[in-house]
Image (tube, rainbow, N blue to C red):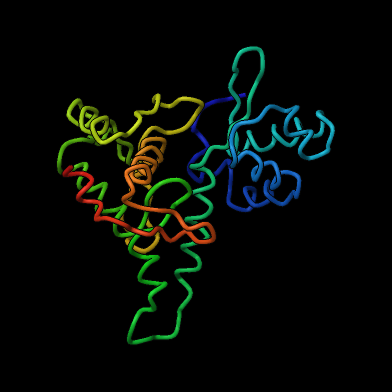
Amino acid sequence: MSNSYKNLELTPEIPMDRLFYCLSSPARLEIIRILSGGSKTVNSISELLNSSQPSVSSHLNILSEYGFVNEFPYGREVFYKLIPERVEFLTTYLDDMAGNHKMPVTTKKSNNNASFSKCRRCYDHLAGHDGVILLKTFLLNKWLKQINDKPEFDLTDKGEINMMRLGVKIPVKRRHGRIFAYGCRDLTEKEFHLGGSLGSEVMKALIAGEFISLNENSRIITVIKPIKDWIEA
């Protein structure tokens, strides 16, 4: 089973309708929901689904083929892990479709719309205006450098030192198939915010430092203290 990201972007080999076909199975959707809470073995998933191991393995093979899950050995067992970037790809696609729908013109944005545009979650990293500004600041400060046109990024020596100073746990690069750092196209800003495992760890550090807090039933993030104060700490 491949651990590559060849299918991360929409390609002729996996057209959009096939991705939705992959998610048309209630069992596969439930497996994705289960894995969103953390890595699991086939046995664990089988018990939670009350389904046979061969059936679960079959669904996992399909999810792996379409780039939604990855497998990795740990000790004597094999674990399955959700690949967030694939989920992000679909949510961005659906968000774009929703954003293209013409809404009635209003003279004033609602508080909810303004909050959604300012700061929100994109899976497990920071999005919205604040997320875009954060990535721009990392690049301006030369903490990150762009390494290809996707775009993907890598930490500079200066960036690694400063991220660690701010309490960011530097993730193992490309561990278990996840992209280390990349530009995730933002729905409202039409620019990039920081995605990947590094983006996830940055958001965790902001939560731990009590600069932001997550809302249980909403993607909107509450900003407690200005995020620029975190960078300048």
Q: Quadrant of residue 114?
A: bottom left
| Image vertical order of residue 149 relative to residue 213, above or below | above
Residue 6 or 157: which is nearer the viewer? 157
Tell me what residue is drawn at x 36 percent, y 64 percent. 188
In the rendered image, which quarter contains the C terminus?
A: top left
- The correct choice, above or below, for 151 with respect to 128 in the image is above
Horizontal and vertical percent position of residue 46: 78, 33
Look at the image and tell me in which quarter the N terminus lies.
Answer: top right
Location of residue 6 with respect to 102 vertically, above or below = above
Residue 204 horizontal/vertical position (percent): 39, 41
Going 22% across and 42% down the picture, which residue do you hit? 138
**Is 6 left, or right, of 55 in this rendering?**
left
Residue 190: x %, y % from top left = 33, 60
Residue placed furthest toward the top: 76
The front one of 81 and 99 is 81
- The image quadrant that residue 187 belongs to is bottom left
In the depicted view, which residue is nearer to us: 21 or 176? 176
